[in-house]
Every structure is written in C-alpha cells, then in structure tokens.
Amino acid sequence: MITDQDKKILQILQDNGRMPMVELAAKTNMSESTCLRRTKSLEEVGVIKGYAAILDAEKAGFDVTAFVQVSINQNTEAAFDRFKKAVRASPHILECYSLSGPYDHLMKVVARSNKELSHFILKTLKTFPEIRDAQTLFVLHQVKHTHALPLEILD
C-alpha cells in the first residue's frame, strides 16, 4: 500500500530522480531520516525499480519511431519463448507487450533512418521465430510521452 508520504516522494522523484535526499526531504516536509527510510523501502519492495537518464531519441540520433503489431504462431509455450528471446535480443525494440485483440504483440521500435527501419522489418524481424503477420505504424508526431505514473488518482 502506498501512503500519502510515499506518493509525495514518488511524484517528486518521477520528475527528478537525481534530487539530493536533503532537498527531497524538504520538499516532502519530512525529516531526512524518514524520507530516506521511506525511499529505501519503496526501492526494496520494487515500487521504485531504478533510476535512469531519460534520453531524447531524435537528439540521440534515432529519427524514426514505429510501432509494429505482430501475430505469432503460439502453438506451444516453447514457440512463445523463442519469440520473446528474439525480442529481448533486438536493440531496435524498446518495448514489447502481449495483447488481446487481432494482434498478439505490440512493439515500439526505433531506428536512425527509414532505411534502417526497413532493414529491421524486412530482414531482422522476418527471422524471428513464429511470426505469422506484422503491421508497421510509423510515428508522425509524438503528442504525449511520459514515464510518470498518475499517482494523484490513487486513493
């Protein structure tokens, strides 16, 4: 259960994961020791999974983002495991989700160019085990992107 104190800590850390504990304690109206204890507890139970720099894909050289919807032959658990292994090994795939609906998986893919993305789809993706069908959706414009969970709606 996430307490109100935890929510304050998490909301602030979602915006600035590098905030010094002294400043975090001041912003949450907690003592340093309480704030540190609560933060460590959130890390230990896995609510806070880690800390990372959030990069701008385009400024880092990845000008193309696409979503690829994939259907696979899920005849056996081993087939699904082979597909997951191939997904995890591909550096172009940032995210992959198993879905309900007409496609089995949705992948977020980045590439430096349309040519590189085309090569990934036509050459690399085709080598993935068990793929039955794939549809690529190119991102034209990013309307919203956040990693922050809406903690304010938790009761």
Image (spheres, rainbow, N blue to C red):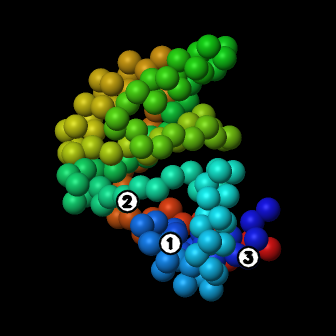
Does label 3 or label 2 sit earlier along the sequence? 3
SS at circle 3 = helix
Image quarter where the N terminus lies is bottom right
Q: Is residue 144 above or below residue 55?
A: below
The Cα atoms of the two marked residues, 2 and 1, are separated by 20 Å
Does label 2 or label 1 sit earlier along the sequence? 1
Residue 21 - label? 1
Query: Dot 2, crowdedness within 10 Å: few (<14), some or many (≥20)?
Result: few
Q: Nearer the viewer, residue 108 or 25?
A: 25
Q: Position of residue 5 (x, y in %)?
A: 70, 75
**Identity of the residue drawn at 51% across and 52% down:** 50
- Let me know if residue 131 appears in the view: no
- Let me know if residue 26 appears in the view: yes
**Identity of the residue drawn at 46% across and 29% down:** 87
**Identity of the residue drawn at 46% across and 66% down:** 17
Query: Dot 3, crowdedness within 10 Å: few (<14), some or many (≥20)?
Result: few
The tally of labels here is 3
Quarter residue 29 falls in: bottom right
Q: Position of residue 118 (x, y in %)?
A: 26, 35
Q: Is residue 41 above or below residue 119?
A: below
Residue 54 - label? 2
SS at circle 2 = loop
Name the residue carrying label 3.
4
The Cα atoms of the two marked residues, 3 and 1, are separated by 18 Å
> Comparing marks 3 and 2, which lies closer to the viewer?
3
